[in-house]
């Protein structure tokens, strides 16, 4: 017999409620669930339980449960009307509400969630459509039988803070690498593991580890820039001897920050940097002097040194690359939900939006370089490379992953290159004019959360 049903939960005020332990279900739901008037059941939300008695209503409502406010409070469920699923356990006496999806972050201030605020609004809107309860919480607000988080009130049209049931699945959107590696965050993830709550994306990726994994795949080697772990001046000299353009990137870097660009000229070496203040000279007569100038920065964190690619440009002098969002479709399949071209601002060598970059549709960015047929072929090749890279990283990295931002570029000969892979890509990566209510990438994230929760029909 079917054991999962979609139901509408309607709060009862104190006057309407006959008893704080009685729930009123529609006769329609009574027939579907094969339950009877006066039957005793246990309601379950997360690991909160309430013992109740069923009262079957004679109304013609479709699949409704009227709950006293005290029951909803005890289960940490919203006081607004909402639609969700119940899973009736095999003994028929336990009715479990779900699924609940939690988005964990480290940035919550005045009911705002930083750069992912609009993305979270999309998730909750799609959750409402799919009858999934979506809420946001800080990693330090996870407790034994509840989380203190934020849920969107459909009646008040705003995010409200309060106690909520433990989630069935968690999407990790902690912004900071330092925070994610902190002791408090580690304890939070240990709590999830102990409670057997699945979560993704596991963690930020290490750029060197990504290169090591991808470079073991012979069919991907032609698309990978030559990359070394920077182990002193000799590594810089060896790479400079091989390539006429180099980039030095922090192993744990993001958003185009703290990157060095090194380029040899006839009588000197030119140094440029993405975010450092201007106290470092830009011209050096020897590699030794250049290395001594940047060495204090290199001591603060590990760096990789990467072959520079002469990229296609937009409007002559603005390098462009491509961000492809890849999402898990099934246990063995990934797909691309978004492809955008990113164009650096003038006088910048990184295209990140945080560094002033702009977004364009791929055909607009490439129309001055290729005909329409070639642009379609390039777009398809970029997707194939991105999906292959996502599959490989997913198979080799520890933990569960459901989303990757794959950065690719095309050189002036039309050859594609894999630049970087991110586990927590920006949620502001859509070109002008693209503004659906819920983006495909948001739907893909919540669909995977739903699958991970175990509540799929």
Image (cartoon, rainbow, N blue to C red):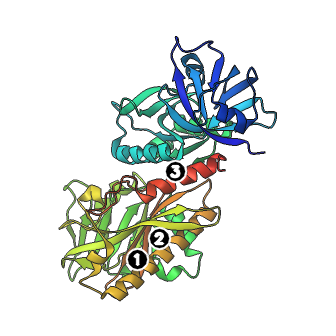
- Quarter where residue 340 is shown: bottom left
Is label 2 or label 3 in front?
A: 3
Q: Are marks 2 and 1 in contact (CB under 8 Å)?
A: yes
Is label 1 or label 3 in front?
A: 3
Gap in angstroms between the C-alphas marked 2 and 3: 37 Å
Q: Which mark is residue 228?
A: 2
Residue at left offset 18%, top offset 77%? 315
**Disc on the earlier residue, 2 or 1:** 2
Against 234, is 455 above or below? above
Residue at left offset 52%, top offset 61%? 327
Query: Is residue 204 at all visible to an observer of this figure?
Result: no
Q: Which mark is residue 239?
A: 1
**Disc on the earlier residue, 2 or 3:** 2
Q: Which mark is residue 216?
A: none
Q: Are marks 1 and 3 in contact (CB under 8 Å)?
A: no
Q: Where is residue 234 shown, x and y percent of the image?
A: 42, 71
Secondary structure category for the residue under label 2: strand
Secondary structure category for the residue under label 3: helix
Nearest the eye: 366 or 274: 366
Q: Residues within 10 Å of mark 1 (few under 14, many from 20)?
A: some
Residue identified by numbered label 3 = 446
């Amino acid at each position: 017999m079917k054991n999962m049903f979609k139901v509408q939960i309607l709060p009862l005020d104190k006057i309407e409620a006959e008893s704080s332990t009685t729930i009123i279900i529609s006769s329609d739901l009574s027939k579907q669930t094969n339950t009877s008037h006066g039957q005793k059941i246990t309601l379950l939300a997360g690991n909160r339980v309430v013992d109740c008695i069923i009262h079957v209503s004679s109304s013609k409502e479709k699949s409704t449960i009227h709950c006293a406010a005290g029951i909803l409070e005890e289960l940490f469920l919203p006081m607004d009307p909402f639609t969700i699923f119940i899973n009736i356990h095999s003994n028929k006496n336990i009715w479990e509400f779900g699924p609940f999806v939690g988005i964990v972050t480290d940035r919550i201030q005045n009911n705002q969630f930083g750069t992912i605020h609009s993305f979270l609004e999309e998730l909750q809107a799609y959750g409402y459509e799919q009858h999934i309860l979506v809420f946001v919480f800080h990693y330090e607000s996870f407790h034994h039988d509840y989380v203190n988080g934020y849920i969107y009130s459909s009646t008040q049209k705003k995010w409200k803070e309060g106690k909520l049931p433990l989630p069935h699945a968690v999407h990790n959107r902690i912004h900071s690498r330092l925070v994610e590696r902190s002791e408090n965050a580690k304890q939070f993830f240990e709590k999830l593991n102990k409670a057997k709550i699945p979560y993704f994306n596991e963690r930020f990726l290490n750029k060197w580890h990504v290169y090591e994994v991808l470079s073991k795949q012979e069919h991907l080697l032609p698309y990978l820039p030559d990359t070394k772990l920077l182990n002193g001046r000799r590594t810089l000299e060896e790479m400079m001897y091989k390539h006429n353009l180099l980039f030095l990137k922090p192993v744990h870097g993001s958003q185009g920050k703290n990157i060095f660009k090194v380029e040899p000229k006839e009588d000197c070496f030119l140094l440029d940097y993405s975010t450092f203040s201007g106290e470092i000279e830009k011209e050096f007569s020897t590699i030794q002097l250049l290395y001594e100038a940047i060495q204090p920065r290199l001591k603060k964190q590990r760096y990789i040194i990467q072959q520079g690619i002469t990229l296609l440009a937009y409007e002559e002098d603005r390098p462009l690359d491509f961000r492809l969002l890849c999402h898990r479709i099934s246990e063995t399949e990934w797909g691309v939900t978004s492809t955008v071209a990113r164009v650096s601002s003038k006088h910048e060598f990184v295209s990140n939006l945080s560094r002033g970059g702009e977004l364009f549709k791929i055909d607009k960015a490439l129309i001055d370089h290729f005909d329409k047929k070639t642009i379609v072929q390039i777009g398809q090749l970029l997707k194939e490379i991105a999906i292959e890279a996502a599959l490989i990283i997913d198979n080799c990295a520890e933990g569960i992953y459901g989303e990757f931002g794959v950065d690719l570029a095309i050189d002036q000969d039309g050859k594609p290159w894999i630049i970087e892979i991110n586990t927590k890509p920006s949620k502001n990566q859509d070109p002008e004019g693209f503004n659906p209510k819920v983006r495909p990438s948001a739907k893909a994230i919540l669909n995977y959360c739903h699958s991970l929760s175990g509540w799929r029909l």
